[in-house]
Amino acid sequence: MPAIFTVDPRSGVPIYLQLIEQVKRSVALGVLAPGEQLPTVKQLAVDLTVNPNTVARAYRDLEHDAVIETAPGRGSFVRADGVAKQTRAATDVAGEAVTQAVREAKSLGLPAAGVRELFESALTRWFPEEK
Amino acid sequence: MSTISIEHLSKSYGKFLAVDDVTIEIPTGSVFGLLGPNGAGKTTTFKCLLGLARTSSGVVRFDGNELTPALFESISYVPERSVLYEWMNGAEHLEMQRRTFKRYDSKRATQLMDLFKLDPRKRVRAMSKGMRTALAIVMAFAINPETLVLDEPTSGLDPVNQRAVLNLIIESAAQGATIVLSSHQIGQVERAADHLAVLQNGRVILSGAVDDLKSDRKIVEGIFPSETIALDGLRRDARIERLDQSGRILRLTVTADGGGLAEALSSMGAQSVRIVDLNLEDIFLNAVSPGSQTADVVEAR
């Protein structure tokens, strides 16, 4: 399995959160298909040179969020229960990105109306069919 | 495999208190990073942990028991200053390990020598600093230890071999070994360790899970329309560790996720608010020398 995840250990964002975000993104984008096996904790820890307990923590949280499931002795798999989970993962990832963009815009001093205008023009650009 | 508990450990050399009431718990299977400036007490802590120095007070327990000679069979220690014999070569050092440790694995030893491209016939006398460090690492890992105590395990190594050592640490941890290491390279601890403690002047000044320390510390920065900022409400806020004001800029170092305080600054009239993540180096520097990081910012009147 190619290393589809990367982490930046020097970032202030905890490594386990970086991993969770990337798995969710991969599931949302279909890079990881339902039923697909994830690397083992040990394998991923060695591939990324990060602490195995940190990887295990990310996997536990992903299980808790119902993104993956672990079969003892067989490994961890992307949950096969369909589009709903993927959409939720996509909403999580996109929601975080929108929150950050709005915070950034506000911190640059833009008023709410200006942010809305930007958002509308982005919508028009990326969803032309819904105009 | 054992949980190592260091309880109220103190060690003095004459009048000098090298380690001062240190309590640390190192969970089984974890990689524990011990950080601190030179002379903070890291090496002394290691020596007391391994029974190589007599403690002045306090105890060290391995799964609740004191250290026994039998336990030593499964512990590897790589001291800061190499204890290699100048007149012996690599193969002879490995032979020494084989005779001392029942767990010695000669196949593994050969793989490790190859990994670091060490010539078994080369005498230590003729080895560079990096080769000596690598040989000490090979000796430590060749016994498949359950507990590893590594004092600056990558000093003198090039980046490729530093990464090789980190990977050995990570593989051992994945197999359940408990590892304690000190390093001046915070980036290595940030990768390999799940728990850490920072020592300064013999005392623990910060400890916890690496990811939690990062989640729990942020800088929240607000820019206000004027230099008059009503700080009274913030001064009593327990989430704020530091508060710095420089003109219209207010900077809070917080022990929370920052979202709540960012909103508080907004509602106080800040025109611009941002939350800055702190990496381990920032957190470390903040702990050992509070203020150095934001030296350009003056404390509010």
Image: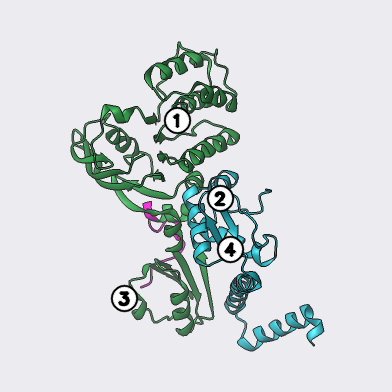
Chain colours: A cyan, B green
The chain to which mark 1 is attached is B
In percent of width and height, residue B37 lies at 38, 43
Residue linked to disc 3: B236
Residue B256: tell me if it is visible. yes
CA separation in Å, label 2 and label 1: 26 Å
Q: Nearer the viewer, mark 3 or mark 4?
A: 4
* Quadrant that contains the N terminus of chain B: top left
Per the image, the residue denoted by label 2 is A74
Mark 1 vs mark 3, CA separation in Å:
52 Å
Marker disc for residue A21? 4
Q: What element carries label 1?
A: loop
Callout 3: SS: loop
Q: Is mark 2 on a helix, strand or loop?
A: loop
Is residue A107 covered in magenta?
no
Q: Distance between the residues labelled 2 and 3?
A: 52 Å
The magenta region covers: B287-301
Q: Is residue B129 positioned above or below B256 on the image? A: above
Q: Main secondary structure of the magenta part?
A: loop
Callout 4 crowding tier (Cα within 10 Å): few <14, some 14–19, many ≥20: some
